[in-house]
Image (cartoon, helix red, strand yellow):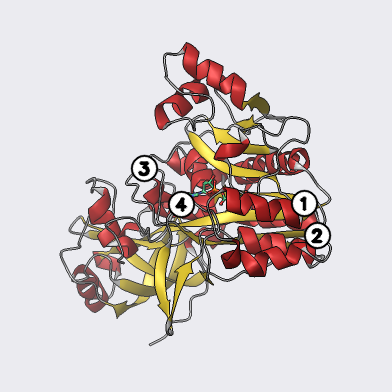
Amino acid sequence: MDIMRTHYASDITPDMSGDTVTVAGWIHEMRDLGGIYFLILRDRGGFMQITMVKKKTDPELFESARRLIRESVLTVTGTVKKEDKAPRGYEIIPQTLSVLSESDSPLPMDITGKVDADIDTRLDSRFIDLRRRKTLDAFVIRHHALKAVRNFLENEGFIEIHTPKVVAAATEGGTALFPITYFNREAFLNQSPQLYKQIMMSAGFDRVYEIGAIFRAEEHDTLRHLNEATSIDIEASFMDHLDVMEILERLVHKVYARVAVDCAPQLEELGIELSVPKLPFKRVSYDDALEIALSQGHTIEWGEDFGTAAERAIGNAIGEHYFLTDWPTEIKPYYTHPYEDKPVYSKSFDLMHPRMELASGSQRIHSHKILHEMIEAHGLNPNGFDFYLKAFQYGMPPHAGWGLGAERLVMTMLHIENIRDAVLFPRDRKRLSP
Ligand code: AMO
Protein backbone atom coordinates (compact mmCIF):
# COMPACT_ATOMS: atom_id res chain seq x y z
CA MET A 1 0.00 0.00 0.00
CA ASP A 2 1.44 3.33 -1.06
CA ILE A 3 0.43 6.20 1.18
CA MET A 4 2.76 8.82 -0.25
CA ARG A 5 0.81 11.78 -1.52
CA THR A 6 2.32 14.05 -4.15
CA HIS A 7 -0.28 16.82 -4.17
CA TYR A 8 -3.01 18.51 -2.15
CA ALA A 9 -6.21 19.45 -4.00
CA SER A 10 -5.09 23.06 -3.87
CA ASP A 11 -1.70 22.33 -5.48
CA ILE A 12 -3.23 21.01 -8.69
CA THR A 13 -4.19 23.36 -11.50
CA PRO A 14 -5.94 22.74 -14.86
CA ASP A 15 -2.71 23.49 -16.74
CA MET A 16 -1.19 20.36 -15.19
CA SER A 17 -3.37 18.38 -17.61
CA GLY A 18 -1.57 15.14 -18.49
CA ASP A 19 0.50 15.00 -15.29
CA THR A 20 0.32 11.99 -12.99
CA VAL A 21 -0.50 12.82 -9.37
CA THR A 22 -1.17 10.92 -6.16
CA VAL A 23 -3.76 12.52 -3.92
CA ALA A 24 -5.38 11.42 -0.68
CA GLY A 25 -8.40 12.35 1.36
CA TRP A 26 -11.92 11.54 2.45
CA ILE A 27 -14.80 10.61 0.13
CA HIS A 28 -17.04 13.64 0.37
CA GLU A 29 -19.63 12.61 -2.19
CA MET A 30 -20.31 9.93 -4.78
CA ARG A 31 -22.38 10.44 -7.91
CA ASP A 32 -23.33 7.38 -9.92
CA LEU A 33 -24.72 8.24 -13.36
CA GLY A 34 -24.60 4.63 -14.61
CA GLY A 35 -22.05 4.98 -17.36
CA ILE A 36 -20.02 7.53 -15.46
CA TYR A 37 -19.07 7.65 -11.82
CA PHE A 38 -17.81 10.68 -9.89
CA LEU A 39 -16.04 10.63 -6.58
CA ILE A 40 -15.51 13.92 -4.81
CA LEU A 41 -12.42 13.59 -2.66
CA ARG A 42 -11.77 16.13 0.08
CA ASP A 43 -8.51 17.10 1.73
CA ARG A 44 -7.62 20.09 3.89
CA GLY A 45 -7.12 22.27 0.86
CA GLY A 46 -10.38 21.57 -0.95
CA PHE A 47 -12.24 19.17 -3.22
CA MET A 48 -11.12 17.06 -6.16
CA GLN A 49 -13.27 15.28 -8.71
CA ILE A 50 -12.23 11.74 -9.56
CA THR A 51 -13.97 10.72 -12.78
CA MET A 52 -14.47 7.19 -14.07
CA VAL A 53 -16.12 6.53 -17.42
CA LYS A 54 -17.33 2.93 -17.38
CA LYS A 55 -16.28 2.13 -20.95
CA LYS A 56 -12.78 3.50 -20.44
CA THR A 57 -12.09 2.22 -16.92
CA ASP A 58 -10.75 -1.14 -15.85
CA PRO A 59 -13.96 -3.03 -14.85
CA GLU A 60 -12.49 -4.16 -11.54
CA LEU A 61 -11.50 -0.60 -10.60
CA PHE A 62 -14.91 0.71 -11.66
CA GLU A 63 -16.83 -1.86 -9.61
CA SER A 64 -14.65 -1.42 -6.51
CA ALA A 65 -15.14 2.35 -6.70
CA ARG A 66 -18.90 1.89 -6.72
CA ARG A 67 -18.75 -0.10 -3.50
CA LEU A 68 -16.97 2.67 -1.57
CA ILE A 69 -18.48 4.18 1.56
CA ARG A 70 -18.64 7.93 2.15
CA GLU A 71 -15.98 9.44 4.44
CA SER A 72 -13.62 6.52 3.92
CA VAL A 73 -10.00 7.56 3.41
CA LEU A 74 -8.58 6.93 -0.03
CA THR A 75 -5.46 7.45 -2.01
CA VAL A 76 -5.76 7.85 -5.74
CA THR A 77 -3.08 7.92 -8.42
CA GLY A 78 -4.25 9.24 -11.74
CA THR A 79 -3.91 11.70 -14.57
CA VAL A 80 -4.96 15.34 -14.29
CA LYS A 81 -7.43 16.50 -16.94
CA LYS A 82 -8.72 20.04 -17.42
CA GLU A 83 -12.48 20.11 -16.76
CA ASP A 84 -14.26 23.44 -16.41
CA LYS A 85 -17.27 21.97 -14.62
CA ALA A 86 -15.26 20.29 -11.86
CA PRO A 87 -14.15 21.96 -8.62
CA ARG A 88 -10.95 23.96 -9.29
CA GLY A 89 -11.30 23.30 -13.03
CA TYR A 90 -9.72 19.86 -13.15
CA GLU A 91 -10.60 16.21 -12.70
CA ILE A 92 -8.44 13.17 -12.06
CA ILE A 93 -8.74 10.01 -14.15
CA PRO A 94 -7.62 7.25 -11.78
CA GLN A 95 -5.22 4.44 -12.54
CA THR A 96 -5.22 3.04 -9.01
CA LEU A 97 -7.33 3.69 -6.01
CA SER A 98 -6.84 2.21 -2.57
CA VAL A 99 -8.89 2.42 0.57
CA LEU A 100 -6.69 3.27 3.56
CA SER A 101 -9.50 3.33 6.10
CA GLU A 102 -13.14 2.46 5.63
CA SER A 103 -15.80 4.57 7.35
CA ASP A 104 -18.73 3.15 9.26
CA SER A 105 -22.17 4.10 8.06
CA PRO A 106 -24.40 5.96 8.81
CA LEU A 107 -22.35 8.95 9.92
CA PRO A 108 -23.12 10.56 13.30
CA MET A 109 -24.01 13.77 11.45
CA ASP A 110 -24.26 15.19 7.95
CA ILE A 111 -21.14 16.98 6.85
CA THR A 112 -22.12 18.26 3.43
CA GLY A 113 -23.94 21.20 4.97
CA LYS A 114 -27.28 20.04 3.57
CA VAL A 115 -28.72 19.11 6.96
CA ASP A 116 -28.13 21.41 9.92
CA ALA A 117 -27.08 19.78 13.17
CA ASP A 118 -27.51 21.36 16.60
CA ILE A 119 -24.42 22.43 18.53
CA ASP A 120 -24.47 19.45 20.91
CA THR A 121 -24.63 16.90 18.10
CA ARG A 122 -21.76 18.72 16.39
CA LEU A 123 -19.63 18.92 19.51
CA ASP A 124 -20.30 15.27 20.41
CA SER A 125 -18.74 14.32 17.07
CA ARG A 126 -16.39 17.26 16.78
CA PHE A 127 -13.89 15.42 14.56
CA ILE A 128 -16.65 14.95 11.99
CA ASP A 129 -17.97 18.49 12.45
CA LEU A 130 -14.46 19.77 11.76
CA ARG A 131 -14.55 18.04 8.38
CA ARG A 132 -17.22 20.56 7.32
CA ARG A 133 -15.66 23.39 5.35
CA LYS A 134 -17.26 26.17 7.36
CA THR A 135 -16.20 24.72 10.69
CA LEU A 136 -12.67 24.16 9.41
CA ASP A 137 -12.53 27.69 7.94
CA ALA A 138 -13.08 29.29 11.34
CA PHE A 139 -10.13 27.36 12.79
CA VAL A 140 -7.85 28.11 9.86
CA ILE A 141 -8.69 31.78 10.45
CA ARG A 142 -8.07 31.39 14.19
CA HIS A 143 -4.64 29.98 13.34
CA HIS A 144 -3.83 32.95 11.10
CA ALA A 145 -5.17 35.42 13.66
CA LEU A 146 -2.92 34.01 16.40
CA LYS A 147 0.01 33.91 14.03
CA ALA A 148 -0.58 37.60 13.35
CA VAL A 149 -0.71 38.25 17.12
CA ARG A 150 2.64 36.49 17.60
CA ASN A 151 4.28 38.28 14.68
CA PHE A 152 3.02 41.63 15.89
CA LEU A 153 4.22 41.14 19.46
CA GLU A 154 7.58 39.73 18.37
CA ASN A 155 8.08 42.80 16.20
CA GLU A 156 7.29 45.00 19.18
CA GLY A 157 10.04 43.31 21.19
CA PHE A 158 7.91 41.01 23.36
CA ILE A 159 9.37 37.73 24.65
CA GLU A 160 7.10 34.70 24.75
CA ILE A 161 6.78 33.05 28.16
CA HIS A 162 4.90 30.07 29.58
CA THR A 163 3.68 30.32 33.15
CA PRO A 164 2.27 27.62 35.45
CA LYS A 165 -1.30 26.52 35.06
CA VAL A 166 -1.29 24.68 38.38
CA VAL A 167 -1.02 27.26 41.13
CA ALA A 168 -1.39 27.75 44.86
CA ALA A 169 -3.37 31.02 44.94
CA ALA A 170 -6.23 32.90 43.33
CA THR A 171 -5.18 35.51 40.81
CA GLU A 172 -8.24 37.52 40.00
CA GLY A 173 -9.65 37.53 43.53
CA GLY A 174 -13.38 37.25 43.13
CA THR A 175 -13.75 34.88 40.21
CA ALA A 176 -14.12 31.24 41.01
CA LEU A 177 -11.29 28.73 41.02
CA PHE A 178 -11.13 25.08 40.07
CA PRO A 179 -9.58 23.23 43.02
CA ILE A 180 -7.44 20.21 42.24
CA THR A 181 -5.46 17.77 44.33
CA TYR A 182 -1.72 18.26 43.99
CA PHE A 183 -0.14 15.32 45.81
CA ASN A 184 -1.35 15.98 49.37
CA ARG A 185 -2.01 19.67 48.94
CA GLU A 186 -4.82 21.77 47.56
CA ALA A 187 -4.00 23.58 44.36
CA PHE A 188 -5.94 25.38 41.65
CA LEU A 189 -6.04 25.76 37.90
CA ASN A 190 -4.81 29.24 37.07
CA GLN A 191 -7.38 31.91 36.24
CA SER A 192 -4.84 34.15 34.52
CA PRO A 193 -1.06 34.48 34.14
CA GLN A 194 -1.41 37.87 35.85
CA LEU A 195 0.84 37.34 38.87
CA TYR A 196 3.55 35.56 36.89
CA LYS A 197 3.68 38.07 34.06
CA GLN A 198 4.08 40.81 36.68
CA ILE A 199 6.86 38.85 38.43
CA MET A 200 8.62 38.77 35.04
CA MET A 201 8.74 42.57 35.14
CA SER A 202 10.78 42.36 38.34
CA ALA A 203 12.93 39.76 36.58
CA GLY A 204 13.80 42.43 34.03
CA PHE A 205 12.20 40.82 30.97
CA ASP A 206 10.69 44.21 30.11
CA ARG A 207 8.05 42.99 27.63
CA VAL A 208 6.49 39.52 27.80
CA TYR A 209 3.54 37.78 26.23
CA GLU A 210 1.79 34.48 26.68
CA ILE A 211 -0.95 32.77 24.70
CA GLY A 212 -2.34 30.12 26.98
CA ALA A 213 -5.24 28.48 28.75
CA ILE A 214 -7.07 30.23 31.58
CA PHE A 215 -9.57 28.44 33.80
CA ARG A 216 -12.65 30.04 35.29
CA ALA A 217 -15.04 28.06 37.46
CA GLU A 218 -17.82 30.57 36.94
CA GLU A 219 -21.22 28.97 36.58
CA HIS A 220 -22.03 31.08 33.53
CA ASP A 221 -23.85 29.26 30.80
CA THR A 222 -23.78 31.90 28.09
CA LEU A 223 -22.79 32.26 24.45
CA ARG A 224 -19.61 34.12 25.41
CA HIS A 225 -18.22 32.28 28.43
CA LEU A 226 -16.09 29.15 28.58
CA ASN A 227 -14.67 27.47 31.64
CA GLU A 228 -11.40 26.98 29.82
CA ALA A 229 -10.51 29.86 27.51
CA THR A 230 -7.41 31.05 25.66
CA SER A 231 -5.96 34.31 26.80
CA ILE A 232 -3.48 36.49 24.96
CA ASP A 233 -1.63 38.29 27.74
CA ILE A 234 1.03 40.96 27.70
CA GLU A 235 2.94 42.82 30.38
CA ALA A 236 5.38 45.66 29.74
CA SER A 237 7.68 47.68 31.97
CA PHE A 238 8.10 51.45 31.95
CA MET A 239 4.67 51.76 30.40
CA ASP A 240 1.33 53.01 31.65
CA HIS A 241 -2.23 52.04 30.73
CA LEU A 242 -2.27 54.46 27.80
CA ASP A 243 0.85 52.89 26.28
CA VAL A 244 -0.53 49.35 26.43
CA MET A 245 -3.93 50.47 25.10
CA GLU A 246 -2.12 51.79 22.08
CA ILE A 247 -0.36 48.44 21.62
CA LEU A 248 -3.67 46.62 21.95
CA GLU A 249 -5.53 48.67 19.36
CA ARG A 250 -2.68 48.37 16.89
CA LEU A 251 -2.61 44.62 17.49
CA VAL A 252 -6.35 44.21 16.84
CA HIS A 253 -6.04 46.34 13.72
CA LYS A 254 -3.12 44.23 12.50
CA VAL A 255 -4.93 40.94 13.13
CA TYR A 256 -7.92 42.06 11.05
CA ALA A 257 -5.68 43.38 8.29
CA ARG A 258 -3.64 40.16 8.11
CA VAL A 259 -6.70 37.89 8.24
CA ALA A 260 -8.33 39.92 5.44
CA VAL A 261 -5.34 39.13 3.23
CA ASP A 262 -4.21 35.69 4.43
CA CYS A 263 -7.70 34.18 4.78
CA ALA A 264 -9.46 35.61 1.72
CA PRO A 265 -10.64 32.14 0.51
CA GLN A 266 -11.98 31.16 3.94
CA LEU A 267 -13.72 34.51 4.42
CA GLU A 268 -15.34 34.14 1.03
CA GLU A 269 -16.55 30.63 1.86
CA LEU A 270 -18.02 31.97 5.10
CA GLY A 271 -19.61 34.92 3.30
CA ILE A 272 -17.82 37.44 5.49
CA GLU A 273 -16.69 40.84 4.31
CA LEU A 274 -14.15 41.79 6.91
CA SER A 275 -13.91 45.47 7.63
CA VAL A 276 -10.67 46.40 9.33
CA PRO A 277 -11.43 48.61 12.37
CA LYS A 278 -10.08 52.13 12.08
CA LEU A 279 -7.41 53.51 14.41
CA PRO A 280 -7.46 55.00 16.95
CA PHE A 281 -10.35 53.31 18.77
CA LYS A 282 -12.68 55.62 20.65
CA ARG A 283 -11.97 56.17 24.34
CA VAL A 284 -15.11 56.33 26.46
CA SER A 285 -14.76 56.89 30.19
CA TYR A 286 -16.73 54.82 32.68
CA ASP A 287 -18.63 57.97 33.69
CA ASP A 288 -19.61 58.77 30.09
CA ALA A 289 -20.65 55.16 29.46
CA LEU A 290 -22.73 55.26 32.62
CA GLU A 291 -24.50 58.33 31.28
CA ILE A 292 -25.27 56.55 28.00
CA ALA A 293 -26.66 53.56 29.92
CA LEU A 294 -28.78 55.77 32.21
CA SER A 295 -30.10 57.80 29.28
CA GLN A 296 -31.32 54.54 27.75
CA GLY A 297 -33.27 53.59 30.84
CA HIS A 298 -30.84 51.20 32.51
CA THR A 299 -30.50 51.54 36.27
CA ILE A 300 -26.91 51.34 37.46
CA GLU A 301 -25.34 52.99 40.46
CA TRP A 302 -21.93 54.64 40.09
CA GLY A 303 -19.38 52.00 41.09
CA GLU A 304 -21.34 49.05 39.72
CA ASP A 305 -20.31 46.99 36.73
CA PHE A 306 -22.46 47.33 33.61
CA GLY A 307 -24.69 44.30 33.16
CA THR A 308 -24.99 42.55 29.81
CA ALA A 309 -27.97 44.65 28.72
CA ALA A 310 -26.36 48.00 29.54
CA GLU A 311 -23.11 46.86 27.92
CA ARG A 312 -25.06 46.08 24.74
CA ALA A 313 -26.80 49.47 24.84
CA ILE A 314 -23.47 51.27 25.16
CA GLY A 315 -21.98 49.08 22.42
CA ASN A 316 -24.88 49.87 20.08
CA ALA A 317 -24.53 53.58 20.78
CA ILE A 318 -20.81 53.49 19.90
CA GLY A 319 -21.10 50.95 17.08
CA GLU A 320 -17.43 49.96 16.74
CA HIS A 321 -14.45 48.83 18.83
CA TYR A 322 -13.86 51.18 21.77
CA PHE A 323 -12.03 51.42 25.07
CA LEU A 324 -13.99 51.79 28.29
CA THR A 325 -11.54 53.68 30.51
CA ASP A 326 -11.08 55.09 34.00
CA TRP A 327 -13.09 52.53 35.95
CA PRO A 328 -13.90 53.09 39.63
CA THR A 329 -10.94 51.65 41.53
CA GLU A 330 -13.21 49.67 43.86
CA ILE A 331 -14.53 47.35 41.13
CA LYS A 332 -11.17 46.57 39.57
CA PRO A 333 -8.74 43.90 40.87
CA TYR A 334 -6.36 44.71 43.73
CA TYR A 335 -3.35 45.12 41.40
CA THR A 336 -4.94 48.02 39.47
CA HIS A 337 -3.20 51.39 39.80
CA PRO A 338 -5.43 54.26 40.96
CA TYR A 339 -4.93 57.75 39.49
CA GLU A 340 -2.62 59.69 41.80
CA ASP A 341 -4.79 62.83 41.71
CA LYS A 342 -8.22 61.13 41.82
CA PRO A 343 -7.76 57.73 43.49
CA VAL A 344 -11.40 56.67 43.25
CA TYR A 345 -10.70 56.22 39.54
CA SER A 346 -8.16 53.75 38.19
CA LYS A 347 -5.73 53.59 35.27
CA SER A 348 -7.73 50.74 33.81
CA PHE A 349 -9.59 49.90 30.64
CA ASP A 350 -11.64 47.28 28.89
CA LEU A 351 -11.45 46.86 25.14
CA MET A 352 -14.98 46.46 23.90
CA HIS A 353 -16.54 45.16 20.73
CA PRO A 354 -20.17 46.33 20.42
CA ARG A 355 -21.19 42.72 21.20
CA MET A 356 -18.96 42.08 24.25
CA GLU A 357 -15.79 42.73 26.21
CA LEU A 358 -12.65 41.52 24.44
CA ALA A 359 -9.88 42.48 26.83
CA SER A 360 -9.13 44.20 30.09
CA GLY A 361 -5.98 45.76 31.37
CA SER A 362 -4.40 48.48 33.45
CA GLN A 363 -1.31 50.05 34.81
CA ARG A 364 -0.37 48.01 37.89
CA ILE A 365 0.53 49.04 41.39
CA HIS A 366 4.30 48.58 41.63
CA SER A 367 4.75 49.73 45.24
CA HIS A 368 5.11 46.74 47.58
CA LYS A 369 3.49 48.64 50.45
CA ILE A 370 0.43 49.80 48.53
CA LEU A 371 -0.05 46.42 46.87
CA HIS A 372 0.04 44.74 50.28
CA GLU A 373 -2.61 47.17 51.52
CA MET A 374 -4.80 46.68 48.46
CA ILE A 375 -4.72 42.89 48.81
CA GLU A 376 -5.94 43.27 52.39
CA ALA A 377 -8.50 45.88 51.41
CA HIS A 378 -9.95 43.35 48.96
CA GLY A 379 -10.44 40.90 51.82
CA LEU A 380 -7.62 38.62 50.68
CA ASN A 381 -4.88 37.17 52.84
CA PRO A 382 -1.45 38.60 51.83
CA ASN A 383 0.23 35.42 53.11
CA GLY A 384 -1.13 33.56 50.13
CA PHE A 385 0.56 36.11 47.87
CA ASP A 386 4.06 35.88 49.38
CA PHE A 387 5.70 34.58 46.21
CA TYR A 388 4.17 37.48 44.28
CA LEU A 389 4.69 40.28 46.79
CA LYS A 390 8.35 39.33 47.17
CA ALA A 391 8.98 40.36 43.57
CA PHE A 392 7.94 43.91 44.50
CA GLN A 393 10.50 44.25 47.30
CA TYR A 394 13.73 44.29 45.32
CA GLY A 395 13.21 46.74 42.49
CA MET A 396 9.97 46.50 40.53
CA PRO A 397 9.62 48.90 37.59
CA PRO A 398 6.30 50.61 36.84
CA HIS A 399 4.41 48.39 34.41
CA ALA A 400 1.14 47.76 32.65
CA GLY A 401 -0.53 45.03 30.63
CA TRP A 402 -3.70 43.41 29.41
CA GLY A 403 -5.40 40.09 28.71
CA LEU A 404 -7.32 39.58 25.47
CA GLY A 405 -9.68 36.62 25.00
CA ALA A 406 -8.64 34.74 21.85
CA GLU A 407 -12.04 33.11 21.35
CA ARG A 408 -13.83 36.42 21.73
CA LEU A 409 -11.48 38.09 19.27
CA VAL A 410 -12.21 35.36 16.71
CA MET A 411 -15.96 35.14 17.34
CA THR A 412 -16.53 38.89 16.98
CA MET A 413 -14.35 39.03 13.87
CA LEU A 414 -16.27 36.18 12.20
CA HIS A 415 -19.77 37.01 13.55
CA ILE A 416 -19.83 33.67 15.38
CA GLU A 417 -22.88 33.51 17.62
CA ASN A 418 -21.68 30.92 20.14
CA ILE A 419 -18.16 31.03 21.63
CA ARG A 420 -18.14 27.20 21.48
CA ASP A 421 -17.66 27.59 17.73
CA ALA A 422 -14.40 29.46 18.27
CA VAL A 423 -12.69 26.68 20.23
CA LEU A 424 -11.97 23.12 19.09
CA PHE A 425 -13.11 21.25 22.20
CA PRO A 426 -15.06 23.61 24.45
CA ARG A 427 -15.25 23.20 28.19
CA ASP A 428 -18.44 24.51 29.70
CA ARG A 429 -20.72 23.74 32.66
CA LYS A 430 -22.01 20.59 31.02
CA ARG A 431 -19.22 19.54 28.73
CA LEU A 432 -16.00 17.79 29.69
CA SER A 433 -15.78 15.55 26.63
CA PRO A 434 -14.60 15.19 23.92
P1 AMO B 1 -10.21 39.35 32.62
O1 AMO B 1 -10.68 38.50 33.75
O2 AMO B 1 -11.08 40.49 32.22
O3 AMO B 1 -8.79 40.00 32.96
O4 AMO B 1 -9.93 38.42 31.36
C1 AMO B 1 -9.35 38.95 30.19
C2 AMO B 1 -10.11 38.53 28.96
O5 AMO B 1 -10.15 37.11 28.86
C3 AMO B 1 -11.36 36.70 28.29
N1 AMO B 1 -12.08 35.84 29.22
C4 AMO B 1 -12.93 34.85 28.88
N2 AMO B 1 -13.30 34.38 27.68
C5 AMO B 1 -14.18 33.36 27.65
N3 AMO B 1 -14.71 32.78 28.74
C6 AMO B 1 -14.37 33.22 29.98
N4 AMO B 1 -14.88 32.63 31.07
C7 AMO B 1 -13.42 34.30 30.08
N5 AMO B 1 -12.88 34.97 31.11
C8 AMO B 1 -12.06 35.89 30.57
C9 AMO B 1 -12.19 37.94 28.02
C10 AMO B 1 -11.58 38.95 28.98
O6 AMO B 1 -11.74 40.27 28.51
N6 AMO B 1 -5.55 39.55 34.50
C11 AMO B 1 -6.56 40.28 33.74
C12 AMO B 1 -5.98 40.85 32.47
C13 AMO B 1 -4.94 41.93 32.70
O7 AMO B 1 -5.29 42.92 33.40
O8 AMO B 1 -3.83 41.81 32.18
C14 AMO B 1 -7.70 39.35 33.43
O9 AMO B 1 -7.60 38.16 33.49
O10 AMO B 1 -12.00 38.32 26.66
Label disc, if present, on residue 142 of the rendered structure = none
Residue drawn at x 40%, y 73% as measured from the top left? 180
- Mark 2: give few (<14), some (14-19) or many (20+) Cα within 10 Å: many
The amino acid type of the residue labelled 1 equals His
Q: Secondary structure at mark 3?
A: loop
Ligand 1 is within 8 Å of the C-beta of the residue at disc 4: yes
Left or right of 43, for residue 379? right
SS class of the residue under badge 2? loop
Whether 114 is drawn above or below 187: the answer is above
Amino acid type assigned to the residue bearing label 2 in the image: Met
Q: From the viewer's perspective, is residue 414 above or below residue 19?
A: above
**Disc nearer the start of the sequence (4/1):** 4
| Residue indicated by mark 2 | 396
The residue to which callout 4 is attached is 175
Instruction: Say which quadrant the C terminus sits in.
Output: bottom left
Q: Earlier in the sequence, mark 4 or mark 2?
A: 4
Mark 2 C-beta to ligand 1 under 8 Å: no
Is mark 1 in CB contact (under 8 Å) with mark 3?
Answer: no
Outermost residue, bottom direction?
A: 1
Please tell me which of labels 3 and 2 falls first in the chain.
3
Q: CA distance from mark 1 to mark 3?
A: 33 Å
| Residue 134 visible in image | no
Question: Percent position (x, y) of residue 285?
Answer: 64, 25
- What whole-number distance in Å separates the C-alpha atoms at marks 1 and 2? 8 Å
The residue that mark 1 highlights is 399
Could one spot residue 396 in this view of the protein?
yes
Q: Answer yes or no: do the residues labelled 1 and 2 have beta carbons within 8 Å?
A: yes
Residue position for label 3: 223
Q: Could you tell me residue 11's position as x and y percent?
A: 55, 62
Near mark 3 (Cα within 10 A), the count class, few <14, some 14-19 or many ≥20, is: few
